[in-house]
Image (spheres, rainbow, N blue to C red):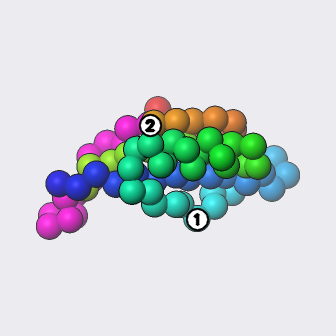
Amino acid sequence: MTTAYLVQAFTAKGSKLVADQSKPCKTEASAIATAERLEASKAGVVAFSQEVDIETDTYDEPRVLFRAGRLPPGLFE
């Protein structure tokens, strides 16, 4: 298994949130730092990690590392 670290930011388009392209990161610390930088310019941002088994193409439940701002309802709840 491998741990994937991702940051997902959202841009406000009127009353809707639109997902930006997710940003892969190498470490938990870099995912959190990236999310903190994006927090000031985005409607919402979440950094998370997820265990991935590439051989079987299976993914464990995501683990939220950082969240800020407006996020879509039900995201990682």
- Residue at the image point whose x is 52% and y is 52% from the top: 7
- Residue at the image point whose x is 33% and y is 48% from the top: 50
Q: Which residues are magenta?
A: 53-64
**Residue 74, x across and y down, in percent:** 53, 37
Would you say the residues marked 1 and 2 are in contact, meaning their CB atoms lie under 8 Å apart? no
Q: Amino acid at mark 2?
A: Val
- Residue at the image point whose x is 20% and y is 65% from the top: 54
- Quadrant into which the N terminus falls: bottom left
On screen, residue 46 above or below 19? above
Q: Amino acid at mark 1?
A: Gln
| Residue at mark 2 | 64
**Label 2: element kind:** strand
On screen, residue 55 above or below 11? below
**Residue 35, x across and y down, in percent:** 58, 45
Q: Quadrant of residue 36?
A: top right
* Residue nearer the viewer, 69 or 33: 33
* In-image side of 38 versus 52 (left or right): right
- Residue at the image point whose x is 67% and y is 49% from the top: 38
**Residue 49, x across and y down, in percent:** 37, 46
Q: Which mark is residue 21?
A: 1
- Residue 29 seen anywhere in this rendered image of the structure: yes
Q: Earlier in the sequence, mark 1 or mark 2?
A: 1
Q: Is residue 62 magenta?
A: yes
Q: Measure the alpha-carbon separation of dots 1 and 2.
A: 18 Å
Q: Quadrant of residue 64?
A: top left
